[in-house]
Image (cartoon, rainbow, N blue to C red):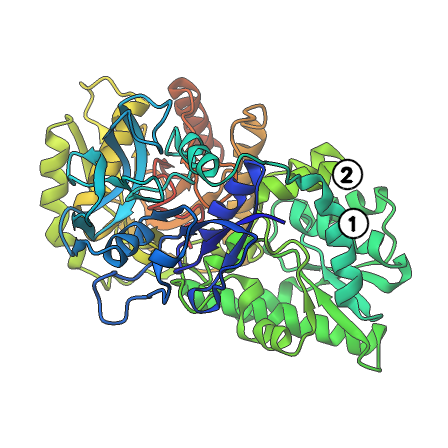
């Protein structure tokens, strides 16, 4: 079967590239650079992005003679720079950094930009850039900051783009990839409909006649995984455990059990574990420690259940509904940078994986593909389209703090922030808390900023989007920006905010309110509500983060009607006696969907 191979240099979007190529009707697979073997089935290569600097001594390389390969090659971001070096060009480091939305000017006669207008919005995430092109190559696009945003060889075999065409933020990215695929082949006959049968046979093959134990969260990932297992094996061999950690959304555990029983699944057990989870998380502030504790407790509880009820002869395997964004953001390859530790990737799970005791049927899929798979499996649409919820639950939506102000580095940039905002007639602060982000394929752990209207400026989402991007790109200690529809009189105060039942119930109630009141807004893919360790003159501060996304690897904040936003935040402040409710206006990247 003909295929396009994506050479993985550790980029956050490597699997997204592979998915886009499959969507264009050509089979794709991913290869590590050291494992790449060119054969007659390969009709094209794509070099991915990556977290390294291509000019560093430990940069990832590819030991291939390009002159001996008679197939088209596309380099993206890091791959663009590496391809340029391999062809004899030069890359410059540390200047002209770009993160987020950028506009480029394309050459219309370019093969890659055929059928695309001259001015294009693209998504950048880089520090290095191509300085000098190889012989027999020409510039095909430029941005405001870099002269060579794209290039191609005169013979139409080599293409490089500094931006990411695979993400939805590059508006014509699919057309660019489509043009590259057309350069590779005239045949597009790969279809994803065959994937259901492949996954069922995968479960049958990997189960090795053992019993399967599935951790059932209640989300679409575990639901689809359970259905695949039930179709692959006799139902008596598939046992599901739902752990009520006390970290779930309002009434979620009872709703989960009712949903699955209504679907006909009978081998279900719920473990009441709120007390042990809250005990273990008591006083824990560090977000990575929270994830590690939750993951270990899950494994311990499963082991206990196995020993007591299922199999005293070690005849079992653990099944997880892990999808690709969970693994890549955990630094799953030796080339990718860890963005956050997923609870399915803590040490105890990794040990079971090494022992061959874990099956992850959908680990190469993205969220929208999982939803599509669920519909192909005839699962109820309301469950398939349910808003995602992180495995660690509300524990990572409650930013814990002991109330002691430890980091003052951001204070040095507060004046710079205010200077930037003057031009927009806005005001703002850098907040004394931190959140996780991803910039240039690396994890960041920096401060959010909050901005608001000073009462004179006409606010638009377009303006806020521009300001958010400028702040993140120019302030080294800021990786996320929030908007307050209500002006701030003074900076909120850092307070103690620990994982307790009382604080979780408070978050549960306000989360349920916002989800219910925005349930009709189908463009919202999910809407985390975050409890901050901050108080203003009204009470505790919260953040809502409505996002739109197709694949969870990239996301854009939802542009809610301003009157609705003001009305909902005002009701919440009165009903729950909370402080202001900020609105997260950060795309992913640079801000991850969850704050921790």
Give the Cα distance between marks 1 and 2: 8 Å
- Left/right placement of residue 434 relative to residue 357 reads left
Crowding at mark 1 (Cα within 10 Å: few <14, some 14-19, many 20+)? some
Element assignment for label 2: loop
Residue shown at 31% from the left, 21% from the top = 117
Q: Percent x, y for residue 555?
A: 43, 39
* 477 up-or-down from 308: above or below: above
* Viewer-closest of 215 and 66: 66
The single residue placed furthest to the bottom in the displayed view is: 313
The quarter holding residue 585 reads: top left
Residue hosting label 1: 227
Q: Which residue is mark 2?
A: 379
Observer-nearest residue: 86 or 48?
86
Give the side of residue 438 with respect to residue 214, left or right.
Answer: left
At which x and y percent is residue 84?
Answer: 25, 52
Residue that appears at 59% across and 39% down: 368
Using residue 105 as the reference point, say whether residue 205 is left or right of it. Answer: right
Q: In the figure, 501 relative to 195: above or below?
A: below
What's the residue at 82%, 62% (across, down)? Answer: 239
Which mark sits nearer the N-terminus, 1 or 2? 1
> In this picture, is 364 found above or below 373?
below
Residue 319 percent location from the top left of the image: 71, 63
Q: Is residue 451 visible?
A: no
In the rendered image, the quadrant that contains the C terminus is: bottom left
Identify whether 168 is placed above or below 559: below
Under circle 1, the secondary element is helix
Q: Foreground: 169 or 54? A: 54
Image x and y of residue 243, in percent: 69, 60
Could you tell me if the residues under marks 1 and 2 are in contact, i.e. CB atoms within 8 Å? yes
């Amino acid at each position: 079967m003909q295929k396009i191979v994506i050479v993985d240099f550790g980029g956050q979007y490597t699997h997204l590239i592979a998915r886009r190529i499959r969507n264009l009707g050509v089979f794709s697979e991913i290869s590590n650079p050291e494992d790449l073997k060119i054969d007659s089935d390969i009709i094209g290569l794509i070099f991915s992005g990556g977290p390294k600097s291509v000019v560093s001594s430990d940069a990832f390389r590819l030991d291939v003679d390009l002159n001996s390969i008679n197939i088209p090659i596309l380099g993206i971001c890091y791959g663009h720079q590496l391809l340029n070096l391999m062809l004899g060009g030069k890359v410059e480091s540390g200047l002209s950094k770009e993160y987020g939305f950028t506009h480029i000017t394309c050459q219309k006669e370019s093969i890659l930009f055929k059928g695309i207008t001259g001015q294009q919005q693209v998504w950048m995430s880089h520090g290095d850039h191509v300085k000098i092109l190889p012989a027999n190559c020409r510039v095909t696009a430029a941005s405001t900051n870099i002269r060579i945003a794209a290039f191609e060889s005169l013979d139409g075999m080599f293409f490089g783009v500094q931006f990411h065409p695979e993400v939805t933020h590059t508006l014509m990215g699919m057309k660019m990839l489509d043009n590259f695929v057309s350069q590779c082949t005239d045949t597009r006959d790969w279809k994803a409909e065959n994937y259901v049968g492949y996954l069922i046979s995968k479960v049958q093959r990997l189960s090795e006649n053992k019993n399967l134990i599935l951790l059932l969260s209640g989300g679409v990932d575990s639901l689809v995984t359970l259905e695949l297992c039930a179709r692959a094996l006799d139902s008596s061999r598939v046992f599901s455990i739902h752990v009520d950690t006390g970290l779930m959304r309002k009434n979620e555990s009872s709703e989960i059990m009712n949903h699955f029983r209504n679907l006909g699944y009978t081998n279900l057990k719920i473990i009441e574990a709120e007390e042990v989870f809250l005990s273990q998380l008591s006083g824990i502030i560090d977000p990575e420690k929270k994830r590690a504790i939750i993951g270990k407790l899950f494994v311990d509880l499963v082991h206990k259940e196995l020993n007591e009820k299922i199999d005293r002869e070690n005849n079992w395997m653990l099944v997880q509904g892990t999808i690709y964004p969970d693994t890549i953001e955990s630094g799953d390859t030796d080339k990718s940078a860890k963005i956050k530790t997923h609870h399915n990737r803590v040490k105890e799970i990794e040990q079971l994986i090494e022992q061959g005791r874990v099956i992850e049927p959908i680990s190469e899929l993205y969220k929208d593909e999982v939803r599509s798979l669920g519909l192909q499996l005839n699962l109820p649409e309301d469950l398939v389209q349910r808003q995602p919820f992180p495995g660690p639950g509300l524990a990572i939506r409650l930013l814990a703090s002991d109330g002691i102000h430890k980091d003052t580095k951001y204070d040095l940039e507060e004046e710079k922030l205010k200077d930037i905002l003057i031009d927009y007639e806005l005001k703002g602060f850098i907040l004394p808390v931190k959140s996780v982000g991803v910039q240039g394929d690396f994890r960041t752990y920096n401060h959010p900023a909050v901005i608001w209207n000073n009462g004179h400026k006409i606010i638009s989402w377009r303006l806020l989007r521009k300001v958010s991007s400028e702040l993140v790109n120019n302030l080294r200690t800021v990786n996320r920006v929030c908007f307050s529809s209500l002006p701030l009189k003074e900076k909120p105060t850092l307070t103690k905010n620990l994982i307790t039942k009382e604080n979780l119930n408070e978050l549960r109630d306000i989360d349920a309110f916002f989800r219910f009141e925005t349930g009709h807004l189908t463009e919202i893919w999910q809407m985390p509500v975050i409890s901050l360790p901050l108080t203003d003159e009204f009470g505790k501060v919260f953040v809502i983060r409505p996002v739109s996304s197709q694949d969870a690897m990239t996301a854009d904040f939802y542009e809610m009607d301003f009157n609705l936003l003001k009305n909902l935040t005002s009701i919440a402040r009165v009903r729950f006696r909370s402080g202001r409710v900020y609105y997260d206006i950060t795309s992913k990247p640079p801000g991850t969907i969850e704050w921790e």
